[in-house]
Amino acid sequence: MEPDLRKRRPPAPLARLLGLLIPPPAREAVLGDLEERYRSPIQYASEGIQTMPYLIASRARRTSSIAIVGLQTFVLVACLGVTLPDLPGQSVPSWAQGGVPAAAAMFALVLRAVYRGEETPVQSGLLDALAAALAMLLSQGVLAALVSAGQIGPDWMLPRGLAMLGFFALPALAIIGGAEGRHGAPPARAPAEAVVQDYQRFERGVRARNRAEIIALGLIVAGSVAILLRFNPPMAPIAWPFQALFMAIIFYLALRGKAAPIPAGSGLEPLRSHFAQELARQNGLRGFMWWFWLGPLFVGLVANLILFGLRMDQPLRIAIGAVALLLLAGFIVKANADRSRAVRDRIAALSAVAEPAG
Amino acid sequence: MAASSSLGQFEQLVLTAILTLGGNAYGVTIHARVEELGRPRAAALGAVYATLDRLEDKGLVASWLSDPTPERGGRSKRHYRLEEAGVRALRESALTAKRICDAVEQSWGEQMWNPI
């Protein structure tokens, strides 16, 4: 098969560029395949570019869970005011004003998942939030450029108040990105001595996530209280009890959120049962936290879509609100079910660990 | 029946390619064999990768990286092999295809094998 042609190598800068664009898990094998098929720089570049959409789409399918993408979308939609009723004289509807940065952020989050490398949960969450923030800012930058070029009206830009509210989405996105979505395959049967190291890894991960969650909740409470005190908005009577609840949860997480350390001098069996118990407890805690984290979204959907639709006699708005409520609940249930399945697999793998011989 | 009923035609081609290539099934060779089996239609290399990912997620094939090879710029090959579920799915697809061939041949006779 034309071995003399095969000896030619693709130009190094081109290979490096393609290497950057190919999702990391496929990079090694695909670059090798492309190099094996190399005939000319143009053939190499064109084949590489044609392959890319398939690789990205396939990786996006593998790395993005529908429940997590759904929850991220709901958080962005709520915080960017997509469901807010339009004000009189508003030339661009709220769904379009908020929809542009929300779509940009979702695009960035899906791309992040495609190119994500080895990261700790905290790094993963922070980078997710950063990617979403940059995408939202970039979308507003592009809109600002179009406005100043006279291509679109200034109402396309997100109002300043909503832009500030949009940043409330970032702690929630960081928590979703850090805590969920990449359960992977159940761990292979580990030797007994590996269980201790595995538990210590789990304990460190839980501690980091717990700390990140407390900080994120603290930021949300601080920001919300500042807004409530400064502006005393009409939703204040609903918002204050939420702040109290958030504070209670922060205290609970500080006291009970961490995984308990391994009891001193315990053998394999007590360790295994302690590990399984902690896995189940943390799973229960996460399940509760999603309902808690996303509780305000239910309130927002009821107020902005269903109640407003009833008041203004808009059946379509009411119907959208009802569907959105069901979808949001469905995404939370699915995220919890996916995680519970992964935890069950992990507990099953633990119970398969053999006692050391002798 | 459950596994093969969800197999698309392209998936069947890729599984057949892996089966016939034996220990030499990796991206380049699978793509070449798929093009050969599916002629005159060309197949995109990316479509082969995406299908291999999907088949792996369904548990029909397994993959592993080989040692780096100098003729590929020192890069590894991702090799594929059929899993037991993949063998079953392919066998069921082949049986269905054979039944279709037999039925069509009964109606059209030997002329069904003439080039169109």
Image (cartoon, coloured by chain):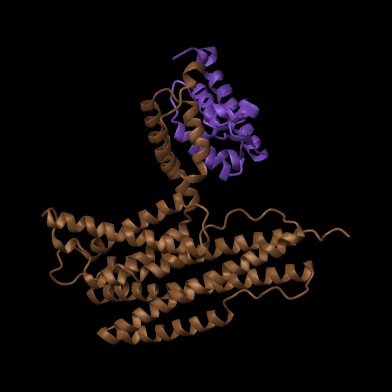
Chain colours: A brown, B purple
Relative side of A90 to A230, left or right? left
| Foreground pick, A184 / B12 | A184
| Rendered residue at 40%/51% (across/down) | A111
On screen, residue A105 above or below A163: above
Residue A277: where, in percent of width, then height? Answer: 68, 72
> Is residue B69 visible to the viewer in this orientation of the structure?
yes
| Foreground pick, A66 / A358 | A358
Disc tally is 0
> Is residue A2 visible to the viewer in this orientation of the structure?
no
Relative side of A76 to B115, left or right? left
Judged from this view, the residue extending furthest toward the left is A150
Q: Residue A169 lies in what quarter of the image?
A: bottom left
On screen, residue A142 above or below A32: below
On screen, residue B69 above or below A111: above
Judged from this view, the residue extending furthest toward the right is A358
Judged from this view, the residue extending furthest toward the front is A12
Residue A333: where, in percent of width, then height? Answer: 51, 66
Relative side of B15 to A266, left or right? left
| Rendered residue at 89%/60% (across/down) | A358
| Foreground pick, A355 / A14 | A14
Residue B4: where, in percent of width, then height? Answer: 58, 38
On screen, residue A73 above or below A117: below
Q: Residue A355 lies in what quarter of the image?
A: bottom right
| Rendered residue at 51%/57% (across/down) | A119
Residue A137: where, in percent of width, then height? Answer: 28, 61
